[in-house]
Image (cartoon, rainbow, N blue to C red):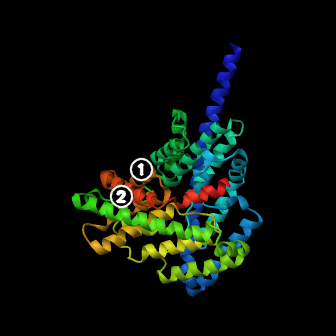
Amino acid sequence: MKFRHYNRLIYYKFNLKFVLLAVVIGLISVLFVKAVELAYKIFLYLEPILGWWLVVYVPSVMLLIVFLLRRFFPEAEGSGIPQALAISQLSESKINSLFALRSIFSKILLIFLGTLSGGTLGREGATVQIGATVMNQLGRKLSLPRRRVMLIVGAAAGLASAFNTPLGGIVFAFEELIKSQRSHIGLLKITAIAVSGVVTIYFLGNYSYFGRVERDLLFFNDWIFLMAVTIGVTAGLISVIFAKVVRWFLIDDTPLMRWRRNNPYKNALYCGVLVALIGIASGGLSFGNGYHESKLALDGQLILPPTYVLYKLLSALFTTNAGIPGGYFATSLAIGNGIGGLVHQFVAFDNPQQYYLLGMVAFLAALTRAPATAIVMVIQVSASQIFTLPLIVAALSATLIANLFGKGIYEYQIARYLS
């Protein structure tokens, strides 16, 4: 009887720690949001003052980041999303190195500096890795399969708090557990994911990440389903091309990759200059992760130019190629906005907000190969539940096209972490 009572006490103590760590993930996410917002405000203040001096400023900050990354914070390398997607296949030693506690500080610091540089990167992927890192502290004494589940739940909690989308985090956890052939996820784990999202809502307000698209603008008919397929196919093809270019720059053993590995500081300098020039050419639209212009576009206050998608793709490519921690997860939503806007420029039928939403869900689904997560997240970040059916069509069309051409970016990056 005493033994049973002791076991129950351990069980309740573990569950209490579990929920408290979910709260910690939410609090770290709030801190991260505030830090990145501050960094971007500082950059927006400096941008008009610097003018063409951005060609000196941007690469200088990127050089500093690469120096700090290589000299002091090697664990901060990467975006955070591939690490999270690889959890179900990682060995114990890999888990210990990728989800070390100090990576929380280093990720926040270097992405703060990356945002300060004007680079096209997001904090959201890093928040996913941070969530997994926090939960890793509780899972150290568990068996490897149970520890992996804890990490996936932590990553999902990070996703939920990063985008203020508790449901999106839960769906992400289910998709990843199904991929790892563990389809069971307990009520407490679902609760923990939701708790992280609730914490961010408490401190940052009950907002949609990209605001709310007016319901009157989201009517749909047979034509919009045709546009959903068109945008889905376009986004799928662009994601395939983007993935191949990223592989050539960052993953495959190419002459450029070998030069980049042997000359990290020259590489950061050249890429920083290119990011600055692209930013100047785009009138500042390519700087940052695209959150602000995407929000304005969905609110009807900004019409994205047809060149926006190209500027954003190039800036994201060279920012990541410079060796800056951060990735494409949040930026993919902005790129998707650009794809939707590009199609609308040619068709010019109905309002552009519908096309922006279809582009967002399509490119995110094609890039991550996780259509369910993409659908739920885009619905939540834009409060566009009424537009669910066209979003499903666009996401599935994009994922189908992308799958026809082989693996995505994250799958190749996952293979690198497993090697």
Vertically, is 304 above or below 217?
Answer: below
User: Which one is in front in this view, the residue at disc 1 or the one at disc 2?
Assistant: 2
Name the image quarter holding the N terminus.
top right
Q: Amino acid at mark 1?
A: Val
Q: Are marks 1 and 2 in contact (CB under 8 Å)?
A: no
Q: Which residue is mark 2?
A: 394
Q: CA separation, marks 1 and 2?
A: 13 Å
State whether residue 60 appears in this view: no
Q: Which residue is mark 1?
A: 376
Q: Secondary structure at mark 2?
A: helix
State whether residue 72 appears in this view: yes
Along the viewing direction, whichever of 249 and 362 lies nearer the viewer: 249
Q: Residues within 10 Å of mark 2 (few under 14, many from 20)?
A: many
Q: Secondary structure at mark 1?
A: helix
Determine whether, in the image, residue 10 is placed left or right of residue 342: right
Q: Position of residue 298 (x, y in %)?
A: 37, 64
Q: Position of residue 118 (x, y in %)?
A: 57, 73
Point 53% across, 33% down: residue: 186
Q: Amino acid at mark 2?
A: Ala
